[in-house]
Amino acid sequence: MDERLRRLKDKANKLPLTPGVYIMKDKNKNIIYIGKAKALKNRVSQYFGAQEKHLNKVRKMVENVEDFDYILTDSEFEALVLECSLIKQNMPKYNILLKDDKGFSYIKITKGNWRNIYAVLQKDDSNSDYLGPYTAGFSVTKAVEEAKKVFKLPTCNKVFPRDIGKDRPCLNYHLGLCCAPCSGKLPLSEYEKNVENALDFLQNGSKKTIKNLTKQMEEAAERLDFEQAAKIRDTIRSIEKVGSNQKVVSSTYKVQDVFALSVMDGKACWAVLRFEDNRLVDSEHFFTDEGESIAEMRAELITSYYSLNRKIPPRIELDGEIADGENIAKWLSEKRGTNVSLVIPQKGEQAKLVDMCKANAMQKLTEKYRCNDRSREALEELAMMLGLKATPEYIEAYDISHTGGSDNVAGMVVFKDGKPLKSGYKRFAIRGFSGQDDYRSMEEVLSRRFDEYYKHKEQGVTVGFGRLPDLILLDGGKGQVNAVLPLLSQYGIDVPVFGMVKNSKHRTSAISTAGGRIDFNSRKKAFNLVTNIQDEVHRYSVAYHRKKHTKSALSAALTDIKGIGEKKAKNLMIKFKTLEAIGKADKEALMSVPGITEANAIEIIKAFKGE
């Protein structure tokens, strides 16, 4: 145990065995974690014991703790209330912080003839009308989908009347899901009636809409317009069918929230289903890192969720045990003003709702974090081929590009779970020397990359310079690998480094090590993955080089003009973008560029006229 951990453990052992809140701080005295405890001494001292027992997230937090404070409370409930308040005030980065990105939703109604309706997140069209705002985006989307299905409004991208008669009706028409205004056979008056009925359905609900439609059906029958009456009858049946289908996602209790947590490979997804009037009205999900205790995670997630000013229902269904549930229920009850129950259903309809919520959480988690089976197999095959200790889920690849030693640049691409992660891509302009030296270029790039790591590592980021990759691949042979290995040792970086070797036809052929090469042989999946990585990093670095080289060439064309140096050339390119635009500019326009004098402007005009 190092001196820092020993000091912190000694301080923790002096804490009392009473309830309270503890506040972890880093070396800059920033608050990085806030927790509560029934017995402060027992809880806090656990952090500074054997580090291998902690999950990765907790271990990272402990690595950054330089000191801690604490506040004693008279009860566990007071500790809970104080913890929630302090977390909301300080937003510590190692606490579970659910982002309150819940915006508003609107129902958009286009103007003019042949109107249509859409569920949207913002008012982005001044030529449309809007209903809303609504807070339950899921409910708005489902309602619009139901309305368009029942009243047979088009869901395609066609614009009417522009596209009327230009194409045959699509499959939706033949399935009875669209009235097909594109056919040119539907009267505008009938279409507008469908739109009005859809809006009535959305604004007033199905019961009132059925009442209005029943009246219209009876009036049509009295006029002996039996065809119209039959159409309205079918619409009423569609509304009733939609209502019966909705009951599949209904709850026994009028108002309640259902929560479920799914965990996979150190990541977690927290799903929420919200019910009002016995109907599902909204759905949310949040991602976070796995905690050391599922019961404690539920407690932290529940308190974080309802700290976001969410409406608290009288009943909350959970998929398992929650730590400190009695106090959390009391805290929620005080916030709501009436009693709130935390329930773990064991059977029946409520248990089915919890199961559905958990399935949604697992689906979201799989979509976000689990690469497909083919990518996973390729990564595992690569790990076995290279003798890696673990599957490389986060790979960085580097390539150098230049033209005869000029405009030296490098590209860095990132592959996460076997797929390109473009938000992690970086570009480097080589500035430590001039001329052609790929080894020195690669050494400079990796040196700058590791400098950035030590600047940002305390931020705990999952993408970018603040994290280290599981594997580094360099475009080149053992020379490139040997150029950077001493650098890793110098920085204290323990990441495996290999080269990607190409054959005479510029195709990936092998993996290079510091002393030789590893052939792919029958490892086809690993070969395809490395080929994709090598092709992508080459494309990215060459694209940057071409852009930089083009700018250099343009700048050189300007610096050949008397009185125009690099700075003035740069200002001209910023202003006019192209040489053609500079050549067409008059004297006054040229003189509007910073640094360009009248004499400079005259020389530029002469140069472009060939004088």
Image (cartoon, rainbow, N blue to C red):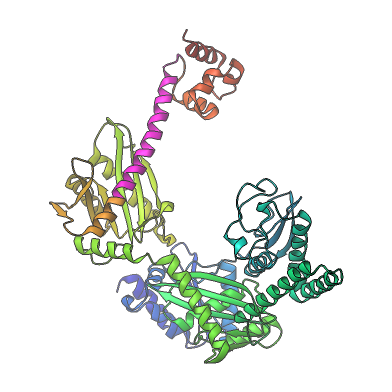
Image: 598 above or below 342: above
Q: Is residue 2 magenta?
A: no
Compare residues 279 and 32 and report the one nearer the observer: 279
Instruction: Report the quarter where the N terminus lies.
Output: bottom left
- Position in image of residue 403 (x %, y %): 30, 31
Please, what is the dominant secondary structure of the magenta stretch? Answer: helix
Q: How many marks?
A: 0
Residue 254 quadrant: bottom right
**Can residue 448 be seen in the rendering of this structure?**
no
Residue 202 quadrant: bottom right
- Position in image of residue 431 (x %, y %): 34, 36
Image: 303 above or below 580: below
**Can residue 509 be seen in the rendering of this structure?**
yes
Left/right of residue 545 with respect to residue 521 in the rendered view: right
Compare residues 447 and 196 and report the one nearer the observer: 196
Q: Is residue 556 magenta?
A: yes
Compare residues 546 and 155 and report the one nearer the observer: 155
- Position in image of residue 409 (x %, y %): 34, 38
Left/right of residue 228 with respect to residue 543 in the rendered view: right
- Position in image of residue 398 (x %, y %): 30, 47
Q: Which residues are magenta?
A: 533-562
